[in-house]
Amino acid sequence: MPVADFEVVLGLEVHAQLLTRTKIFCGCSTAFGAEPNSQVCPICLGMPGVLPALNAQVVEWAVKTGLALGCAVQPVSVFSRKNYFYPDLPKGYQISQFELPICLGGGLTITVDGQEKLIRLTRIHMEEDAGKNLHELAADGGSGVDLNRAGVPLLEIVSEPDLRSADEAVEYLKALRAILLALGVNDGNLEEGSFRCDANVSVMRRGATEYGTRAEIKNMNSFRFLKQAVDFEVRRQVALVEAGEPVVQETRLYDPVRGETRSMRSKEEAHDYRYFPEPDLPPVRVDEALLARVRASLPELPRARAARYQQVLGLPAQDAGVLVGDGALADFFDAALAARGGGAEAARKVANWTIGELSRLMNETGLPPPAWKLTPAGLAEVLALLDAGTVSGAGAKALVEELFRAGGDPGALVKSRGLAQVSDQGAIEAAVDAVLAASPADLERHRSGKKDLTGFFVGQVMKALKGQGNPGVVNALLKKKLGGLPPGEGR
Ligand SMILES: [Zn+2]
């Protein structure tokens, strides 16, 4: 296996759209999905003579991200013009940061195969997004351009080439996404492109000291595609090196349909862009007061939260990881647990419902926790009803689903929907008697020891009680009526 003779060297460049209401240099809305070219003005259209004005929120969130990632936030940073021509860039240049970015250094820790590893960051800089070319739009076969996205603020987060496999790259991307979600600066939406990544991939023979020539892969809008693209690219480069052919420095696109990367264009060097300081914007200054204010606003970060869930609440690592992967889900869990009260046992139950049923409903509806009609207190109340035996497990599930979709008062819904669990001995005994009377042949088989039909009878009784029978009472009564263990049992 030749791939094993090689070491993979990977670095990621992540573009994260900041959740500001307005663009980075003008007051236009950043809302996604509006009519094309409805959120533009002379500034983001790049008309001559206009002046950009920096959105203060962008700086504050760049600082927040930098502090969370352990970067050195620079007291002075500078915007530059990155010159290139493309139809979605009407100015002919992109305002970005080059020589003096707002953050340098830093890093984040990932866990792969139980091993912790620090992935260092090179830098974080602020820039504006470009527009979007629409090639399927015009009926006459022409192309259109939507400039609503032009001027939307981005953070570009560049890692050092510290990643050594596609799995590490995926873990890094997940960890970074979770941090940005926890900070509330980005929505983590890979599909809509508001959190996207390019990967710089190269291979070198094991033991070599110099990195191979790298290719940059673009267009990976899911964790799965990132893994597939990197794996493909590694195999492609290894095959080239093995055949004695050169790896060309270039930009490649990942095609998820064919599962391969293909050449898009030769890779530009920085000097191709003729960067120079943006003359229309003063240097960005971050003073101690801003640093202190932002530092005080930092929330608990995902790794610290996961550690707390494991050490204080006793949750399994896997569950803690799922919860902190989405800060809003973890917030819901925290609030529901606070409402429910109790120790590790309560935490485990609240976590199971949050990760299981609620994640399922979230994926099905696409609604984030703040948009749910079910409140944390509502979930706590349902779990209290379940623990008290007022509703069965199935009843609690039905209740949670209805509350999630329509909201309401759990206690009132139990009554109006007939979800109360039957714990009444008399009612259950009547159902047990009716089931046994209706199946004399099965009863005989069970009693003769030919087959243990306890499970069958439990099912029949629960069916007769429309799933609302208290399982403990049903089991106890059946056991009594069936005469304890069947004779065949235990032989
Ligand atoms: Zn504008």
Image (spheres, helix red, strand yellow):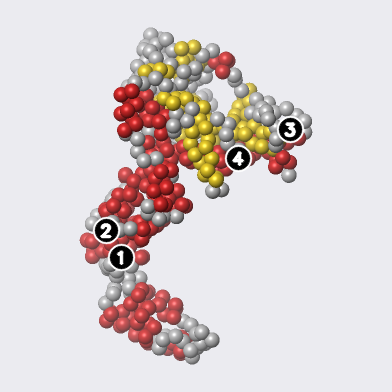
Numbered badge on residue 177: none
Give the SS element for disc 3: helix
The residue identified by callout 4 is: 165
**Alpha carbon separation for disc pair 3 and 4:** 18 Å
Residue 338 visible at all? yes
Name the amino acid, label 4.
Answer: Ser
* Between discs 1 and 4, the one toward the N terminus: 4
**Alpha carbon separation for disc pair 1 and 3:** 63 Å
How many labels, in total? 4
* Between discs 1 and 3, the one toward the N terminus: 3
Picture coordinates of residue 302 (x, y %)? 41, 42
Res 129 quadrant in image: top left
Numbered badge on residue 241: 3
- Labelled pair 4, 2 in contact (Cβ < 8 Å): no
Q: Residue at x 41, y 75 (%)?
A: 459
Name the amino acid, label 2.
Answer: Glu
* Between discs 2 and 1, the one toward the N terminus: 2
Give the SS element for disc 1: helix
Mark 1 nearby-residue class (10 Å; few <14, some 14–19, many ≥20): few
Name the amino acid, label 3.
Answer: Val
Q: Is the N terminus in the top left, top right, bottom left or bottom right quadrant?
A: top right
Residue 131 visible at all? no
Numbered badge on residue 387: 1
Give the SS element for disc 4: loop
Mark 4 nearby-residue class (10 Å; few <14, some 14–19, many ≥20): some
Q: Does mark 4's beta carbon lie closer than 8 Å to ligand 1? A: no
**Alpha carbon separation for disc pair 3 and 2:** 62 Å
